[in-house]
Amino acid sequence: MKHTPFNNSVVKAFRIIELIENEIHGLGLKDISERLNYDKATTLRFLITLENLGVIRKRDGKYFLGLKLFELGLKVPFKMIVVDKVHDILEKLVNEINETVNFGVLFECKVLYIDKIESKRSLQINTHIGDKISLHCTALGKAIFSILPERQVDSILEKIKLEKKTRNTIIEREKLLEEIKKTKKRGYSIDNEEFEEGLRCVAVPIKLEKIGFYGAISVSGPVTRFTEDTISELAKKLKNIEEKIMKEVNM
């Protein structure tokens, strides 16, 4: 009987990737080694190799998935540079406002989450790094739409379905285009319970045209905390953050 070739090292590496994938706050060497019942030295060799390949990344002693798996075919090294440079700025913002901050980029007519920092408050939003979400019903998506060339917006709208997520979701093309115009004029977008009931978000776009990076940063929270005044204040903070990011990445 002919046996299919089987490489145990590849299987072990993939198990590490799968384990890390389910931990949005990252995992340390000891945790990974113990959970998979791998020798510590062996685990470290796998982690170093995967990190060097860009499949995972290390921050503050913990390992997270890298963008290699999420954005094959795109300019992954550039994206990783952006994420690494922006993360500390976003972390400071979370510490200041104590609300969840998200960083997304346009990918295949969706918003790809490339970074997320949860607040210490009780509400946890059910999205993770690597998730792809709709453009039309999210603050991240509408902010990204606002910086795209008009022809690209039209092209995307021809390809996607304006699916109704909540009673507030905009599913009429003309209304969405009007919302994108408002976003462009004021410099920030708002998701008013359009993606999830009880949740509001505010976002500003991040445009790095030289590397084809069309992204956005958002702050999310419950409607009880995200009043009109709060959203206005958060929008000002996000605009300041946008300026810092543009200087930091120097693009």
Image (cartoon, rainbow, N blue to C red):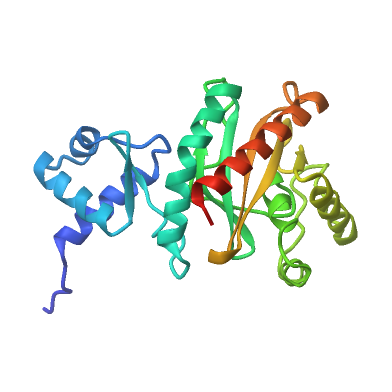
Task: Out of 127 and 101, give the one closest to the viewer.
Answer: 101
Query: As displayed, is residue 175 above or below residue 84?
Result: below
In-image side of 86 versus 160 (left or right): left
In-image side of 8 versus 27 (left or right): left
**Which residue is located at x 85 percent, y 58 percent?**
177
Q: State which quadrant residue 202 falls in.
A: top right
* On-image quarter of the C terminus: bottom right
Query: As displayed, is residue 193 above or below residue 175?
Result: above
Residue 117 in view, yes or no: no
Task: Out of 235 and 67, give the one closest to the viewer.
Answer: 235
* On-image quarter of the N terminus: bottom left
**Which residue is located at x 36 percent, y 37 percent?**
26
Give the image location of residue 42, x and y in percent: 11, 47
**Which residue is located at x 62 percent, y 43 percent?**
243
**Which residue is located at x 74 percent, y 67 percent?**
149
Query: As displayed, is residue 229 above or below residue 26?
Result: above
Give the image location of residue 242, x and y in percent: 62, 43
Q: State which quadrant residue 218 falls in.
A: top right
